[in-house]
Image: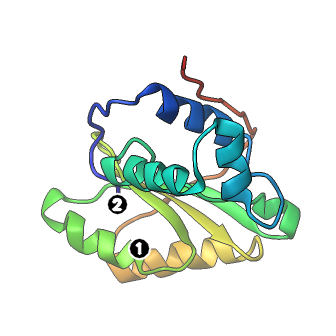
């Protein structure tokens, strides 16, 4: 699970990387090399900076975004109210399901939020039931009604 948000200093190059790569990597034999060239840095520097941004928590993930529905699958946001004393144990159980794409702690009565991604729509309810049985806790299914894209851009 990502650590709590902390202020992370981004230099101009970090901001250019985040801005540029939100739109995706080039589709070619060496996408990192081409992206780095477009940014005016070396491929090694780009990879090193991405690894640091992930380690520092400035980025919580870096990878492809698939539209599960377009591939015949499904996804949903789920939430749980987990007793603080059981949080780490329940986290391990929930994260043990391959369908859990990512899982976040929140400062709220519903303190665990995670995304389920499945190969077919009917599997969402099956996995929710499996998680409920494994944890003994209710899982609240919050399916997407409408999709919005919010881009994050930094001044370089």
Residue 130's spot in the image, x, y percent? 49, 81
Say if residue 144 shows up in the picture: no
Q: Residues within 10 Å of mark 1 (few under 14, many from 20)?
A: some
- Image vertical order of residue 93 relative to residue 41, above or below: below
Where is residue 124 drawn, in percent x and y?
65, 71
Residue furthest top in the image: 155
Q: What residue is shown with label 2?
A: 1
Q: CA distance from mark 1 to mark 2?
A: 9 Å
Residue at the image position 85 percent from the left and 70 percent from the top: 72
Residue denoted by label 1: 95
Q: Quadrant of residue 118?
A: bottom right
Task: Identify which residue is drawn at 40% across, 64% down.
Answer: 138
Between 135 and 90, the residue placed more toward the observer is: 90
Task: Judge from the rendering whether residue 111 lies leftward or rightward of residue 74; answer left or right.
Answer: left
73 vs 105: above or below: below
Which corner quadrant of the image does residue 77 belong to?
bottom right
Q: What residue appears at the point 53 percent right and 72 percent down from the top-left corner?
A: 128
7 vs 52: above or below: above
Other-residue count near label 2 (Cα within 10 Å), few / some / many at <14 / 14–19 / ≥20: few
Q: Secondary structure at mark 1?
A: helix
């Amino acid at each position: 699970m990502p650590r709590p948000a902390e202020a992370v200093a981004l230099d101009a190059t970090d901001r250019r990387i985040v801005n540029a790569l939100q739109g995706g990597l080039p589709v070619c034999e060496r996408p990192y090399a081409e992206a780095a060239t477009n940014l005016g840095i070396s491929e090694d520097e780009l990879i090193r900076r991405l690894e640091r941004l992930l380690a520092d928590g400035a980025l919580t993930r870096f990878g492809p975004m698939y539209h599960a529905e377009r591939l015949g699958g499904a996804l949903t946001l789920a939430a749980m109210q987990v007793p603080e004393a059981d949080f780490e144990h329940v986290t391990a159980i929930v994260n043990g399901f391959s369908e859990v794409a990512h899982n976040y702690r929140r400062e709220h009565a519903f303190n665990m939020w995670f995304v389920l991604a499945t190969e077919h729509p009917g599997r969402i309810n099956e996995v929710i039931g499996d998680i409920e049985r494994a944890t003994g806790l209710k899982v609240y299914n919050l399916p997407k009604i409408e999709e919005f894209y919010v881009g994050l851009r930094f001044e370089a």
